Each structure stands twice: as structure tokens, then as C-alpha cells.
Amino acid sequence: MKHGTLLPLAGLICTLVPTLASAYSGGPPDRFASNPPFDQNCTFCHFSYEVNSGDGDLQILGLPSEFVPGQTYPLTVMLEDPGQQRWGFELTVLDDADDFAEGGSLVVTDPLNTQISEDVEGTEDYLKHTSEGTHWPSDGPTSWNFDWTAPDLPSVTFYFCGNAADGDQSFVGDYIYARSTTVTRREVTPVAETSWGRVKSLYVAKR
């Protein structure tokens, strides 16, 4: 069930500049993927409803339970909400040990619908929709495809936020969803620690 209206004071700032609503159709500002250290999401401007209060869903598809450093994974962000007509998202991947360090490399595979911007105050990249990528007007669900090349880090977290908008080019009437998913590096047992590894090391040492 969709819940009542929320009007946070911060969101009122956005109403002072109504042209921003149509401007953000080309991609939201950085650092609104519900990621640390500020944990801001799109309800800062799209303030009609509390985050995750709609009847829709936001998912990331294709993530492995464990990743292999250097391997590239094709991923998909999917957003749905019955009755909404325009769609947007923002995503970043961060090193769990450093909120300002990116967790691997985001790769645009569909430049018509997605783009990457690098935060000018940090090292993290943000993947987001383009104007074409809002898929307006459409009933959804909608999706955006991209690649991610895994880093050599113990674990990373995907932070992503979706905007299921009504398409009236204003900040009101839009449902915002925020998610995060953590994945860990696959640990590979070194060859030297296996039985065959010990035998091989002895053979090599005697040569």
C-alpha cells in the first residue's frame, strides 16, 4: 500500500527552482544513490512520499554471490511501479573499507540510455540514466544494462536509487526506492597450500 505524503524541509528547496525537475530528466546530481557518507537519496527533491513507500520494486540483476577480481559482469538495474510513467536511477559501487573509494569499474554498454559521471569531490563514479533512458511514457517495468569489472578488494557495496515518476515534469507524485547490496571477493586457495602444491614445491626445490 502506498503511504501518506512527506514534505521534508530539505525538499522544499527544490520547489524554488522548478526547472530542475525537467533538467534532472537527463540525469540526477551525484551522491544521491543513498550511499555513504551522506546517505542522500532522490527524496531530497522528489519529496511527496517516504523512500520505499510505493507498490513498486528496485533490483539489481546479475550480481554473483562472490566476485573474481578483474572479471567483468553484465548487470541490470530494474525498476517497476504500477501507474508510473517515467523512470530514472543512480548507482555507485564503493569499497567497504573506504566510503570515498570506488569498488571496481562501471562500464557503459548502452550510451543511449545510461551515462557515467565522476564525482568532482571524490573518486567514485556514478552510473545514471540519460534523457532517453527515462523511457517516457511507458508503464514499466524498465531496466538499464551496464558492465562492472570487479576490483581486488575484500568486499564492495552497490548503492542504487530509483525514481518511479508520474511524468508530469515536477518533483511531486514520484516514488523513490533505495537499495544496497554487498558482495565479497571469492577466496582462492593458493596452490602451495594443497597436497599437490607441496609435492610440486619440493620437486622444484630439489632441481
Image: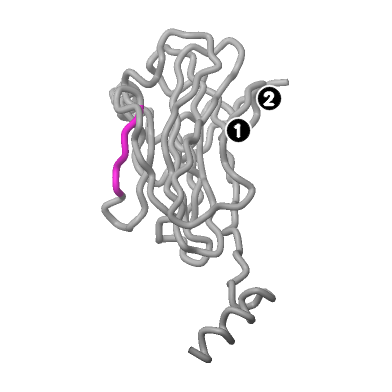
Q: Calculate the distance from the C-alpha at mark 1 to the C-alpha at mark 2.
A: 8 Å
Mark 1 vs 2: CB contact within 8 A: yes
> In the rendered structure, which disc, 1 or 2, sits on the residue that comes first in sequence?
2
Q: Which labelled disc corresponds to residue 50?
A: 1
Q: Which labelled disc corresponds to residue 3?
A: 2
Query: Which residue in the rendered view is the most extreme toward the right?
Result: 1
**Predominant SS of the magenta segment:** strand
Quarter of the image that includes the N terminus: top right
Secondary structure of the residue carrying numbered label 1: loop
Q: Position of residue 133 (x, y in %)?
A: 37, 21
Q: How is the image coloured?
A: one colour
Crowding near pointer 2: few (<14 within 10 Å), some, many (20+)? few
Crowding near pointer 1: few (<14 within 10 Å), some, many (20+)? some
Q: Which residues are magenta?
A: 114-118
Disc 2 marks which amino acid? His
Residue 144 magenta: no
Indicate the quadrant where residue 16 lies: top left
Q: Position of residue 145 (x, y in %)?
A: 44, 29
Disc 1 marks which amino acid? Glu
Asked if residue 206 is positioned above or below residue 11 in the image, the reply reads: below
Asked if residue 123 is positioned above or below residue 110 in the image, the reply reads: below
Q: Position of residue 190 (x, y in %)?
A: 58, 72
Q: Residue at x 33, y 57 (%)?
A: 123
Q: Residue at x 36, y 34 (%)?
A: 28
Q: Residue at x 62, y 26 (%)?
A: 57
